[in-house]
Image: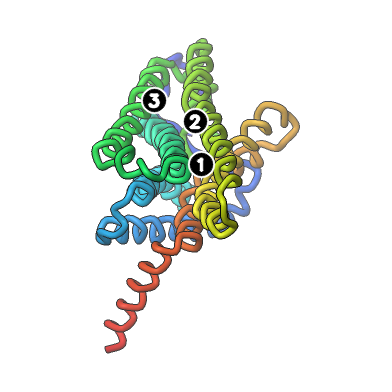
């Protein structure tokens, strides 16, 4: 396993090391990874199944939630199985093409999830601030177009990342201290100028995730203003309850990412394994917690989940 390429040729494969400094605890660290992935897999699959099969849930909010569940499945499946292979079998080898593929799917689904959260915020804005035109503004055609726009935006802004990484020569170490391939983490190991990668990555972050977050803040400012002007307390409580689950999901998506960026920018004395653990929280927390939050907070979904589980229990019993 060469850590330094003295021939000047570019590496064609890398070795993901997992979490450096905590190798002795890899087996124990794998447990929350495994159970988080299991919950994400079962929870999001159940959510998709219920929304697709129940016609009463074919409404804008639930269709957007179904899109969110699909992106969560892709995001977690892109990262966690490889991390578990590293923890359990020390199987960290990955080709350059495999690494670039992982970079594409991680960043594309992350940006797609941000776009879907923005669409869900717009859905809540129309439902609360302009309820009379809700079904006309957010009809099936509009929802389909929004979904396609989210996918196309993610594809178009992340595709250049593939070429920016592929063009780099990797003649230094091929040992990556991480559990998955991330654009800048890989680019830092190149023996070439990576300023284009740095500035393009920053521009993508600002024009997608940061812009989405700002628009979500604006929409919820308008939503809260409308809620507190509702005539009855019951209507205010119902509206706040409807938005509560969405706000919880938004917090689980953006807060770990913000905290990770702050520690990477200012936490120069923070151990490397802390940075990597925080990066993994960004990949693990939303897919695991989103179905739990919506399952608990959304009455219609909770009722259908309980009904499905009870029906299965009766079938097994009799």
Q: Residue at x 28, y 36 (%)?
A: 142
Q: Residue at x 36, y 45 (%)?
A: 64
Residue 285 shows up from this direction:
no
Q: Which residue is mark 1?
A: 179
| Disc 1: CA contacts within 10 A as few (<14), some (14-19) or many (>=20) | many
Q: Which residue is mark 2?
A: 212
Give coordinates of residue 50: x percent, y percent. 31, 61
Residue 219 shows up from this direction:
yes
Q: Residue at x 52, y 52 (%)?
A: 239
| Disc 3: CA contacts within 10 A as few (<14), some (14-19) or many (>=20) | many
Q: Quadrant of residue 221?
A: top right
Q: Quadrant of residue 278?
A: top right
Secondary structure under tag 1 reads loop
| Disc 2: CA contacts within 10 A as few (<14), some (14-19) or many (>=20) | many
- Relative to residue 218, is residue 156 drawn left or right? left
Mark in front: 2 vs 1? 2
Secondary structure under tag 2 reads helix
């Amino acid at each position: 396993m060469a850590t330094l390429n003295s021939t000047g040729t570019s590496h064609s494969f890398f070795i993901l090391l997992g979490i450096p400094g905590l190798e002795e605890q890899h087996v124990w660290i794998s447990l929350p990874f495994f159970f988080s992935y299991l919950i994400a897999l079962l929870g999001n699959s159940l959510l998709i199944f219920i929304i697709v099969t129940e016609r009463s849930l074919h409404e804008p909010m639930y269709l957007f939630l179904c899109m969110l569940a699909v992106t969560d499945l892709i995001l977690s499946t892109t990262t966690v199985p490889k991390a578990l292979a590293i923890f359990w079998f020390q199987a960290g080898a990955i080709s350059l093409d495999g690494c670039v593929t992982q970079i594409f799917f991680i960043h594309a689904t992350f940006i797609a999830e941000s776009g879907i959260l923005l669409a869900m915020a717009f859905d809540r804005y129309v439902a609360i601030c302009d309820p009379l035109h809700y079904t006309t503004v957010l009809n099936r055609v509009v929802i389909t177009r929004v979904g396609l726009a989210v996918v196309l935006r993610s594809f178009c802004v992340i595709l250049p990342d593939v070429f920016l990484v592929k063009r780099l020569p990797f003649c230094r170490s091929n040992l990556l201290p991480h559990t998955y391939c991330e654009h800048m983490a890989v680019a830092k190991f190149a023996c070439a100028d990576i300023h284009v990668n740095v500035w393009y990555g920053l521009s993508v972050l600002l024009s997608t995730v940061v812009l989405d977050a700002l628009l979500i803040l604006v929409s919820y400012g308008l939503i809260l203003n409308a809620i507190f002007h509702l005539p009855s307390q019951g209507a205010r409580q119902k509206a706040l309850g409807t938005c509560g689950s969405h706000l919880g999901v938004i917090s689980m998506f953006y807060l770990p990412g913000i905290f990770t960026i702050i520690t990477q920018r200012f936490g120069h004395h923070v151990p490397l394994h802390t940075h990597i653990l925080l990066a993994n929280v960004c990949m693990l927390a939303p897919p695991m917690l989103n179905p739990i939050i919506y399952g608990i907070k959304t009455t219609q979904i909770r009722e259908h989940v309980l009904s499905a589980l009870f029906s299965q229990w009766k079938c097994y019993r009799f």
